[in-house]
């Protein structure tokens, strides 16, 4: 299981090259047993980054939310800030990848990432090569779609606006965008499943301390105490949860 991480200042972390020119990463958390990890990735064309030219799939899920810039897996739908993509395991994608400008995105995977190239894909829309369909379906949700889907709800005990992005109907594991109004506070003490939070916009105070200057990140393993959180301004957070939160 990943360790408990509270108020990690993501913007203060160094960018580490991943191998291909112009591809960098800030690893936020990792499970040493499974290889599951969350990282902020950066694509920098000015440093030589070029998108993959061949479609491929992974044997684990790949979950992405756009943070800055503009890039695409198919040259039709462009990943902008708050665009969300979920590729279940063995989902073929990357048919015509392209990038328009330097881009960053938050990336989550369920194990160490492998690449299986498909030289002649069946077509240029997402499709699965798995023997059985995944319980958690593929998703490509544009920024406009997510903004329009925000609804009044409750997050960690207090009122907020919520856009559910992707949820496993069997386990309840899933992801959401949550808008916390200024003054929102966390009412829960702990959860029976993991909770992961990345602050995309706004100021979130932790345990009475001033908010960090950058974008904070949190990971709470199951049954570990949550922090005392307070939104000092309207906050947009990307959350991932390991069970049914009743959203």
Image (cartoon, helix red, strand yellow):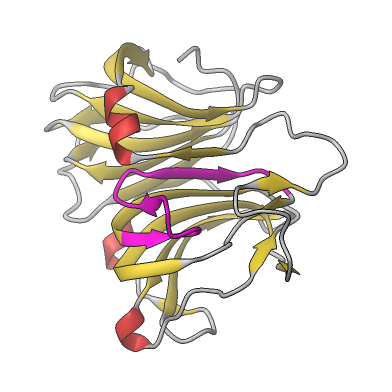
> Is residue 180 shown left or right of residue 85?
left
Q: Quadrant of the C terminus?
A: top left
> Is residue 164 shown left or right of residue 214?
right
Question: Is residue 228 visible in the rendered structure shown here?
Answer: no
- As for residue 74 lying within the magenta part, the answer is yes
Is residue 226 or residue 145 the one in the foreground?
145
**Whole-percent x and y of residue 34?**
73, 54
Residue 173 position by quadrant: top right
Residue 207 position by quadrant: top left
Q: Is residue 137 above or below residue 79?
A: above
**Whole-percent x and y of residue 144?**
28, 35
**Whole-percent x and y of residue 53?**
57, 75
Q: Is residue 153 above or below residue 136?
A: above
**Whole-percent x and y of residue 156?**
38, 18
Question: Is residue 202 visible in the rendered structure shown here?
Answer: yes
Q: Residue at x 34, y 31 (%)?
A: 146
- As for residue 95 lying within the magenta part, the answer is no
Q: Is residue 162 above or below residue 242?
A: above
Is residue 50 or residue 223 the one in the foreground?
50
Q: Residue at x 29, y 49 (%)?
A: 81
Is residue 150 or residue 155 the one in the foreground?
150
Residue at the farthest front position: 123
Q: Identify the magenta region.
A: 70-89
Q: Residue at x 46, y 87 (%)?
A: 21
> Is residue 50 shown left or right of residue 94?
left
């Amino acid at each position: 299981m990943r360790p408990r991480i509270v108020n990690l200042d993501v913007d203060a972390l160094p960018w580490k090259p991943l191998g291909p020119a112009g591809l960098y990463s800030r690893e936020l958390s990792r499970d040493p047993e499974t290889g599951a990890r969350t990282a902020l990735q950066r694509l920098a064309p000015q440093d030589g980054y070029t998108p993959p030219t061949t479609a491929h799939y992974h044997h684990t899920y790949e979950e992405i939310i756009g943070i800055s810039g503009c890039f695409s897996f198919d040259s039709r739908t462009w990943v902008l800030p708050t665009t969300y993509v979920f590729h279940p395991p063995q989902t073929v994608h990357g048919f015509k990848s392209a990038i328009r400008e330097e881009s960053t995105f938050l990336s989550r995977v369920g194990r160490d990432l492998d690449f299986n190239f498909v030289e002649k894909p069946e077509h240029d829309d997402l499709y699965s090569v798995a023997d059985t369909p995944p319980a958690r379906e593929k998703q490509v949700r544009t920024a406009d779609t997510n903004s329009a889907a925000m609804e009044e709800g409750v997050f960690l005990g207090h009122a907020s606006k919520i856009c559910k992005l992707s949820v496993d109907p069997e386990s309840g594991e899933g992801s959401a965008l949550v808008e916390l109004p200024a003054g929102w506070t966390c009412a829960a003490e702990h959860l029976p499943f993991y909770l992961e939070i990345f602050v995309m916009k706004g100021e979130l105070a932790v345990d009475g301390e001033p908010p960090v200057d950058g974008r904070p990140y949190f990971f709470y393993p199951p049954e570990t105490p949550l922090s005392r959180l307070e939104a000092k301004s309207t906050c947009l957070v990307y959350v991932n949860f390991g069970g049914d939160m009743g959203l």
